[in-house]
Amino acid sequence: MSEAGVNVDYPTKFYACSSDAPEVTSPKNPQEVEFATADVSRAVTSNINYIGSRFALFGDMKYSTGSPVEIFRNVEVKYNGDAWNYAGTQYWFPNHEHSFVAIYPAEVFKNDDGARYVNSRLSFSYTIPTTDGAILDKDGTLDLLVATHRRMYNAGGDNTIFLRFGHLMSLINFAPAFSDNLLSDDAYILLHRLELLEIATQARFDILPASRQSGNQTDDMEVDVTTQETDNPAMTFTTPVKVKNHAESTNLFALADALIMLPQSFSAESEAKIVFYYSINDETTMRQVELPLNNQRWELNNRYTYKFTIERSGLKLDQCEINPWNEIKGDHIVVD
């Protein structure tokens, strides 16, 4: 067995690792397992086909109710400008169910030997990176994508898997407004810093291709996210964000540059909150307001925008907009 999986020089015979599996004679015209990105006109698909793009691949196959035979484990699949390629050659085996999990970018597993792949289920942990121990490494946080595929392969079937990637993370943005009737419309506040208190910064992902129903294949999946650690990361705005009095709310981040965070739930008793530090006009006095997160939920593949108003009495949450996260951070990657 090579790094890329089970390599077979045809014609040969393959014996599945199961007592109920018959001797399988290789087909006369073996079909190589190939990968492509899905049609961007379909929902929750992804174009990641830029030169040098890489995803990590895990996969197995099984005959009937037999035990799965692993054929891919953390194999790098790379785009060269024309096609996705991996080391070695893996073929489809007729009358076997093949299952795959793909994670983008491949670098998430570069120095991580903690990933487990058992019975078609991929499990791994991811930690939101920080610098200097407490400063959120916003640019270093990976926009994790996932695609799965499960197929009962029949001889002569299509040999290409069209991967449909979706986000594993949540995208968080804030849109503050400022309202003070004792100040003129020329007044403003400057937002200098925010802190995320009691936020999950490490979680385990368990990803399993969904069972096939009436058809011979599916791209559906089951994803469980289990938070493991919480922390209090913070970030300082190099250029403070200016919000004018009585003006429209101002997004703290551009759509493609918002905070990428782990999916998580906040209980009614949760102490999690966002603390904003600001000054008024040219004052040097630093003030702060808090946005509680209790009873909130950040789902994977969703984009959240918290619209709130800073007043003399504190912070008033106007609404939280929740939308599908339809763009991926980076110039070359677009989710439709």
Image (spheres, rainbow, N blue to C red):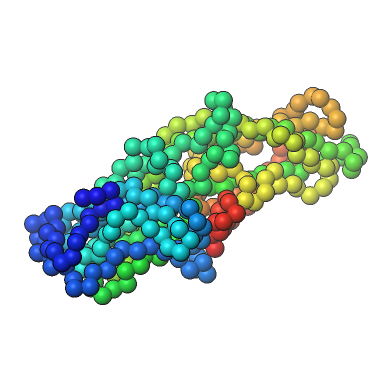
- The answer to whether residue 127 shows anywhere in this view is yes
At x 53% / y 40%, what residue is drawn?
141
- The answer to whether residue 215 shows anywhere in this view is no
- Looking at the picture, how far across and down is residue 151, in whole percent? 29, 65
Q: In this view, does 74 lie above or below 61?
A: above
Q: Is residue 27 left or right of residue 136?
A: left
Q: Is residue 305 left or right of residue 84?
A: right
- Looking at the picture, how far across and down is residue 22, in whole percent? 9, 64
**Image quadrant of residue 10?**
bottom left
Quadrant location, the C terminus: bottom right
Q: In this view, does 3 lie to the left or right of 169?
A: left
- Looking at the picture, how far across and down is residue 55, in whole percent? 42, 52
The residue closer to the viewer here, 282 or 113, is 113
- Looking at the picture, how far across and down is residue 72, in whole percent? 29, 52
Q: Is residue 104 above or below residue 272?
A: below
At x 46% / y 64%, what residue is drawn?
82
The residue closer to the viewer here, 83 or 199, is 83
At x 43% / y 63%, what residue is drawn?
83
